[in-house]
């Protein structure tokens, strides 16, 4: 049996949708037994949610006021203490997982695979390298404990069922460090769907020219019920917040519909969107590389076309 | 002395379009331009700025890899690093091995900060900094977009999925850099000449007591599946009609 431990990402009350995708990835491993680990100040609500995901066999909780913030230095020793006996330790390839999982791997002395996009066996996985320009198949020796982050854009979310996995509380004898302290989080409050899990995403690039102009995407986003993303160029120029960046070093997304406005399509951006079901590109430059991968391309001025789309979809 | 250790990696240049070898044994690197990993350049720039503010006295740049890596170390010295350490090996170095080597160098150098790029643009692992801080038992502040050094502490703003998070960490610590932390300086010709005289020590992993192990065996490389080229529509109306017919919008 392959025992897989998934480290839950959550905001204190709700499970991050990426975790149901990690469960699906873990279930692709033959003979899998899947445990979700919830570290929180009060893990009850998140654990109850995790227990209803199809394919979850057990939920383990660790309650500790120190877990109110997701600090890697605090969480990693707790995960490492739980992880013995598990063949695989998974986390999502979000900034939470990217920050935390290598710290766990080092404490366990285990190798880590980042951005697992497909499971070939319990010891063989595929992952993208060079900004997605190559896919490598990697094998670990049987019996090696493996830590991995799951590329969430590559997996469908496991569904929720009526069955509930047993929830058990663990008490750990681990000394937690005080050398890392949370100060603040400035989050752009938005009523829009989460960029990483939205069904529809519309993004803007350098062509917008200013933060004010960038806002013309808002009306269309509302009409479509879409999340709003941005290219690196637009974020660097200050038109959009850094958490809106889509691409190799930003968010990797896989919506049903992706619409890119005024984005030329640098390879680093394309790597973040190529799992989208349908890609639409609108750009003034008919030679823009984004048209090479777009399902529908339209050459034109974003300032003219966005209001038109908003009116037509109305 | 307040010292900053900066780890750099020699990688295929950012602008090169990487191709998989036809036999699937790797990617084409022969005759391809190599550079310092862009995130590591940002790490070095940040270290130099901290030194220029008088908050550190020495910047030591380190790398692990074959003899050719000394080109990138010389570039780093020309940017302004004071000295360089080259752990020379032709072996495949996985992130955990790299972290173990850096940890030994940290024990020797006793820096107040180790700054690394958040990921290398070749293997895209995003692991080494976090592993190093775990082995060192010190704080980590990953994906930094702003760093302020105080008295025995650093205040670091991090780019995370939810927005911008600020942490206070005790020093010594590990920081990994994101794109918007700074814009690295250009190297000037006189600095390249000066860099030739700066100290560059060559070490071997065996002498540091680390044996590179290959736990993650790459068995096959493939190009990614290509999306087929779609259709061009003539105006917004045609676009909306096409999306409607596919049921993508109402």
Image (spheres, coloured by chain):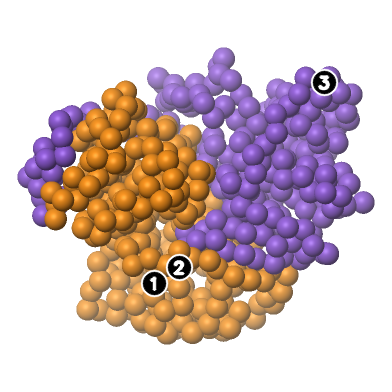
Chain colours: A orange, B purple
Q: Chain of mark 1?
A: A
Q: Which residue is mark 3?
A: B190
Real-space Cα separation, disc 1 to disc 3, in angstroms:
55 Å
Quadrant for residue B225, please give it. Answer: top left
Q: Is residue A275 left or right of residue B55?
A: left
> Are the residues under marks 3 and 2 on the same chain?
no
| Residue at horizontal 39 percent and vertical 83 percent from the top | A45
How many C-alpha atoms fall within 10 Å of the one at disc 2: few (<14), some, or many (≥20)?
many
Real-space Cα separation, disc 1 to disc 2, in angstroms:
6 Å
| Residue at horizontal 62 percent and vertical 59 percent from the top | B157
Q: Which residue is mark 1?
A: A15
Q: Chain of mark 3?
A: B
Disc 2 secondary structure class: loop
Q: Give the label, 1 or 3, closer to the camera.
A: 3
Disc 3 secondary structure class: helix
Disc 1 secondary structure class: loop
| Residue at horizontal 57 percent and vertical 64 percent from the top | B165
Residue reaching furthest to the right: B1
Q: Earlier in the sequence, mark 1 or mark 2?
A: 2
- Quadrant for the C terminus of chain B, please: bottom left
> Are the residues under marks 1 and 3 on the same chain?
no
Where residue A157 sits in the image (x, y, percent)? 29, 61
In the image, residue A58 sits, relative to residue A187, either above or below, namely: below
Where residue A242 sits in the image (x, y, percent)? 49, 52
The answer to whether residue A15 is seen in the rendering is yes
Where residue A131 sits in the image (x, y, percent)? 46, 37
How many C-alpha atoms fall within 10 Å of the one at disc 3: few (<14), some, or many (≥20)?
few
Q: Which residue is mark 2?
A: A9
Where residue A13 sits in the image (x, y, percent)? 42, 79
């Amino acid at each position: 049996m392959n025992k897989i431990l998934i480290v839950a990402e959550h905001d204190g009350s709700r499970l991050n949708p990426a975790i149901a995708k990690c469960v699906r990835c873990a279930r692709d491993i033959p003979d899998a037994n899947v445990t979700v680990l919830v570290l929180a100040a009060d893990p009850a609500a998140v654990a109850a949610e995790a227990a209803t995901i199809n394919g979850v066999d057990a939920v383990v909780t660790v309650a500790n006021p120190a877990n109110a913030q997701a600090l890697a230095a605090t969480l990693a020793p707790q995960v490492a203490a739980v992880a013995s006996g598990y063949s695989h330790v998974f986390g999502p390839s979000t900034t939470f997982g990217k920050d935390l999982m290598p710290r766990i791997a080092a404490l366990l002395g285990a190798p880590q695979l980042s951005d697992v996009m497909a499971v070939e066996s319990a010891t063989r996985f595929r992952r993208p390298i060079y900004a997605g320009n190559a896919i490598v198949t990697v094998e670990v020796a049987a019996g090696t404990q493996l830590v991995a982050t799951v590329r969430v854009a590559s997996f469908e979310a496991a569904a929720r069922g009526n069955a509930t996995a047993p929830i058990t509380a663990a008490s750990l004898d681990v000394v937690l460090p005080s050398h890392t302290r949370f100060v603040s989080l400035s989050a752009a409050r938005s009523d829009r769907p989460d960029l990483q899990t939205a069904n529809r995403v519309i993004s803007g690039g350098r062509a917008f020219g200013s933060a004010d102009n960038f806002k013309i995407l808002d009306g269309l986003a509302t009409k479509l019920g879409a999340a709003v993303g941005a290219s690196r160029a637009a974020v660097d120029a200050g038109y959009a917040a850094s958490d809106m960046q889509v691409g190799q070093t930003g968010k990797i997304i896989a919506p049903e519909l992706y619409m890119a406005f005024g984005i030329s399509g640098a390879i680093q951006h394309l790597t973040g969107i190529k799992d989208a079901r349908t890609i639409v590109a609108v750009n003034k430059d008919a030679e823009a590389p984004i048209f090479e991968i777009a399902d529908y391309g339209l050459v034109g001025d974003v300032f003219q076309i966005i209001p038109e789309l908003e009116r037509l979809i109305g | 002395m307040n010292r900053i250790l900066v780890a750099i990696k020699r990688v295929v240049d950012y602008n090169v379009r990487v191709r998989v070898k036809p036999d699937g044994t790797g990617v084409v690197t022969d005759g391809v331009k190599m550079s310092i990993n862009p995130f590591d350049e940002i790490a070095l720039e940040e270290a130099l700025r901290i030194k220029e503010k008088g908050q550190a006295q020495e910047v030591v740049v380190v790398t692990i890899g074959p003899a050719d890596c000394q080109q990138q170390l010389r570039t780093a010295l020309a940017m302004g690093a004071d000295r360089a350490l080259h752990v020379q090996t032709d072996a495949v170095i996985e992130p955990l091995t790299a972290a173990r080597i850096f940890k030994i160098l940290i024990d020797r150098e006793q820096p107040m900060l180790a700054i690394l790029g958040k990921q290398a643009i070749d293997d895209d692992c995003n692991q080494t900094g976090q592993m190093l801080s775990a082995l060192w038992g010190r704080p980590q502040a990953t994906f930094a977009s702003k760093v302020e050094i105080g008295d025995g502490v650093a205040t670091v703003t991090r780019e995370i999925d939810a927005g911008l998070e600020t942490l206070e960490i005790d020093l010594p610590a590990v920081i990994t850099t994101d794109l918007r932390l700074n814009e690295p300086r250009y190297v000037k010709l006189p600095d390249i000449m000066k860099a030739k005289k700066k100290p560059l020590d060559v070490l071997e992993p065996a002498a540091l007591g680390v044996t590179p192990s290959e736990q993650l065996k790459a068995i096959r490389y493939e190009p990614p599946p290509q999306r087929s080229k779609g259709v061009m529509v003539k105006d917004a109306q045609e676009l909306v009609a096409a999306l409607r017919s596919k049921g993508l919008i109402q």
